[in-house]
Every structure is written in structure tokens, then in C-alpha cells.
Amino acid sequence: MFKILRFPFQFTAMKNIFLLFFLSITFSTLAQTEATTVKKAPEVKEGIGPFAQLIIRGVTLIDGTGAPPVGPVDIVVRQNRIIRIETVGYPGVAIKPERRPRLEEGGKELDCSGMYLMPGFIDMHGHIGGSQAPIAEYVFKLWMAHGITTIREPSAGNGLDWTLEERDKSAKNLITAPRIKAYTVFGMGSKEPIATPEQARQWVNENFRKGADGIKFFGAPPAVMDAALRENKRLGLRSACHHTQVYVARWNVLNSAKAGLTSMEHWYGLPEALFTNKTVQDYRLDYNYQNEQHRFGDAGKLWKQAAPPFSEKWNAVMDTLLKLDFTIDPTFNIYEASRDLHRARRAEWHEEYTLPSLWEFYQPSKVSHGSYWHSWGTEEEVMWKENYRLWMTFINEYKNRGGRVTTGTDSGFIFQLYGFAFIRELELLREAGFHPLEVIRSATLFGAQALGMEKDLGSVEAGKLADFVIVEENPLQNLQVLYGTGAIHLTDDNRVVRVGGVKYTIKDGIIYDAKKLLADVKTMVAAEKARTGFVIKQPGVGESVIGNR
Ligand SMILES: [Zn+2]
């Protein structure tokens, strides 16, 4: 998420043990480049296929382009490519067998009558674990169990070589994992601080040569940012930027977009581009960026300081970004604890699916990153609700004017769990004003476009790769049916049940039983709890406040 916070290009100089300790969260990504701690995914074949011919029968198709659902449809796949999409009847009418594509000898049929099929989901902001979740298999399976077949790793946090190795194994389907796009954190591996445009260009070329798919920036001095972005673009690579507060006063989203940045993460740097009566945020006067309550508390007051929705300045900035074909990856979910901490920490999946190490990492702390609720209550949450309203207004209108908004999560921080958080992100786009079909398009086609993969991915069309999400319930009517824990439903005979949860995730024509993947995760978490005797406890419960408030 916000792992690298200050002067990320100077990390190799960080030999001072005290400093390393003090900034251990800030620089965890960098530390990991030297000593990888995240366990790689095992090479075990878990799905079935691909097949010489696979026919998925009887689905209602939501194709990812914004087109309305159509069904029943049979989809024919050869190995890992979609060959044909055949509409075979009408709702409520028995399908005539002669209308259907014929199964060849040695072919495989998957009866999905009455189910809904979408393109594989794309998580544009997916860190593969980290010290808080040091098991790649755990993270990959949570993603795959929620239909995520492609992720962008925004920092290659376990080291570029580590990430490229997992990327290549995933590409060959040697491991159960989404496709991976590796965007190296700018400056990673550099022997010295990157202080000049020449050094920036040199690093960018080296990154390209090493095989990275792009760069993730956190900000840098303007001349360095400008040189790096232009060179990266010249090489044909893509980029992402989390504009940290320490750089936004002199380089915001508009500067980045004009220099060639292809996507912005989160939202920082955008309100700053919308200032009309100030040039820096109205920081509290005792503000210290290393105090996360200051950081997140003041961030919650930021959108209010920007030009109001539909004002001249607001329109001008939006139109400039639109002209540049700029992608916005808001990651709404990762800030949700700021407006509703209770909801985030009591999410029902924590008990069975959250690793003890993640739970510990989430707890309020002066040193853990993203654990900023030292004293967080009504005032902060109300402020953040307003912050969301203004932010969502911008994002929804950006989409309405033809802008590309994608779905990213940044899971592994602030109570947001891999996979589950992606579904929450879909719900938050819905809340921002997106039609559910627009939500699904953001989660699929727009992600593929932003990654430069739209020829192969992002929609269900003949010729594209066979990446699908299949679910028994209609996700347009209720996105919550995509949660691994399902949606609540009262039956006709008055029983409370759960419905939904992704049934099959198909990647490259290989069929994965999504519920089995989730069961594996549950087993991993139970084993870790048994080993450590860990029990989830809500923050502060049972701790005395006497003497040291
Ligand atoms: Zn991130």
C-alpha cells in the first residue's frame, strides 16, 4: 500500500540499523529485496484442464463490455482460447439439443445451467503478501477463489526476481495463481540514491531490461519523476503512482499524467491538483507525516479543500486527464476503515480466513503502517464519509465522461483481506454511482486495457483467453453473492441460508473449484492458529487503561 513513504530511491543508503528499525514498515519492501521472506506457491496441479475442447453450457453471459446479460449461452473453448459463443435458447424455455455446439470426442462439458459467467476479474493493486501474510499460496488462493485471474503487483514487494519467477510459473500454470504483472518500485535495487534525470533514465532502462512490466512510483523530485516517466513511456512500459504527501506540493497527478504516467493509485495528488485557494493542504500545525493518525486524519479533510464538484477547475482537471487517456485506480476499499472502522474489523471472514500475522499487523500502532486509529471515533469517521462522497462524485463523473476507472484493492492492510476486499471494491463502485454492468466492466475490460492486455483479456469474446468467473446467483442484482462467504438468503420455507460464492474460476481454460480453494485457505489459517494458539481478539479488549492513558 503505502509501504515506501519517503525518499524511496535512497534506500540502499539505509544501513543504519536504528533507522531501519524506525522505518521498518516504510522500507519493508526494500528490505525484502535482500531477504525474501514470502514463501513461494507450491508447484501443484489443482485445476482440471485445459481441454482439447471445453463446452460451458447454459450460462447467462455478462461479457464485460457493458453489454446486458444474454442467456442461455454455450461457450466453446479450445485449450485456452474462446472459439465460439453460441446463444442457444430463451429464458424459461427448454433448450433444443440440436441448437447446441456438439461435444467432440475427448471434449469436456461443464454444465452451468442457470449460472452467470463473467470474464476473469483483474485486481490492479495486488501485493503478494509481505511480512504480514508471508505465504503466497494463501494470497493466490484467496484471489482465485474470488474469480481474480490477473493481478498487477504494484511494487514487486518481494523483490523483482521473486515476482518474475512467480509470474512465469503462473503464466505456465505450474502454480495456482492469477496472471501477474510486475511493476517494480522506482529505485528498487539501485546502488545509490537516484537524484538526477540521467540516473533516473538509467534505472528505468535497467528495469526494462530485467523484464519488469512497469514501474510503481511514490513520488520523487520533479526532474527525476519527469525523466523517469518519459523514459518508461518511450520504452513502452506502463506505470502507476501513489502520490505521497511529501511530494504532492510540487508534483501532483496532473504533472504525472502529462509526463506519461498511465495510472494513478488511491487518490492522493488529485485533490491537490484541484486546489483553487491554496497550494498546500491545510495541515494541522503540529502535523508529522510519521504520525499516522495525523496522516490519515488530515487526509480525511482533503477533498473538502479541493474545487467543488462540477466547478470550472474541477471540470478542467478532469478533462485534461480524460484527454491523456489516464486510468484511475481508486482502491476505495482500503480506506473504508477510516469511515467505518467497526465494519472493517468485524467483517465476518476474519475469523476463518485472516491469518494471525495479518490480524496482528492490523492493530493500532505507532509503528505499523496503516494502523492509524490511535484514537479514532465519530468525528474522524464523519469527516471521512464526506471525503468519500466528494471523491466518489469525481470518480463516477470521470467514468460518465468516458474515463477508465479500474478495480484495485491494496489488500493486506487496514483489515482488508485478499479476494474479499475485491468484492467490496465492486460494491463501493456501485455506491459511487456505477451501474453493476459498469462495475463489472471496470473489473474486467478496463483493467485489461490499463494493463495493455485487452487483445487477450477483459471480455468474453471469441479469440480471447478463456478466463472466466462462474457463479450460481445473479451478481448484478447483488454483488455480495461474489463474496466467498456468500450472501444471506431466506428460503421459501423460512430457513436462513447462504447463496453464491464463486463456483468456478477458469484461467487459461483450466477449471478451478473456487470453494475448494477457499477451503484450503481455511485449513491454512486453522493450522497456523493451532500452531501458535492464536485467538482473534478485538483491539484493546481486556487491557487495563489505568496508569497509562
Ligand atoms: Zn499498495
Image: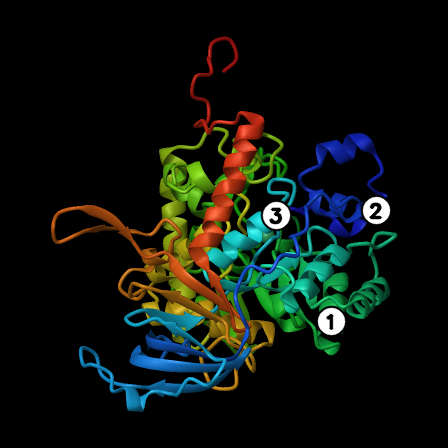
Name the spot of residue 414 as percent of width and height, x first: 50, 41
| Residue drawn at point x = 34 percent, y = 62 percent | 430
Could you say which is closer to the camera, residue 34 or residue 497?
A: 497
Name the spot of residue 91 as percent of width and height, x first: 21, 79
Number of numbered discs on residues: 3
Label ID, residue 12? 2
Kind of element beneath mark 3: loop
Q: CA distance from mark 2 to mark 3?
A: 23 Å
| Residue drawn at point x = 51 percent, y = 50 percent | 418
Q: Which residue is mark 3?
A: 129
The reply to whether discs 2 and 3 touch (Cβ–Cβ < 8 Å) is no
When asked about the image quadrant of residue 44, the answer is bottom right
Q: Is the residue 302 above or below the residue 443 in the image? A: above
Kind of element beneath mark 1: helix
Label ID, residue 232? 1
Say if residue 547 shows up in the picture: yes
Kind of element beneath mark 2: helix
Q: CA distance from mark 1 to mark 3?
A: 26 Å
How many residues crowd around disc 3 within 10 Å: few (fewer than 14), some, or many (20 or more)? many
The amino acid type, in three-letter code, at marker 2 is Thr
How many residues crowd around disc 2 within 10 Å: few (fewer than 14), some, or many (20 or more)? some
Tell me if 112 is positioned left or right of 278 in this view: left
When asked about the image quadrant of residue 314, the answer is bottom left
Q: CA distance from mark 2 to mark 1?
A: 22 Å
| Residue drawn at point x = 36 percent, y = 81 percent | 74
Earlier residue among tags 2 and 3: 2
How many residues crowd around disc 1 within 10 Å: few (fewer than 14), some, or many (20 or more)? many
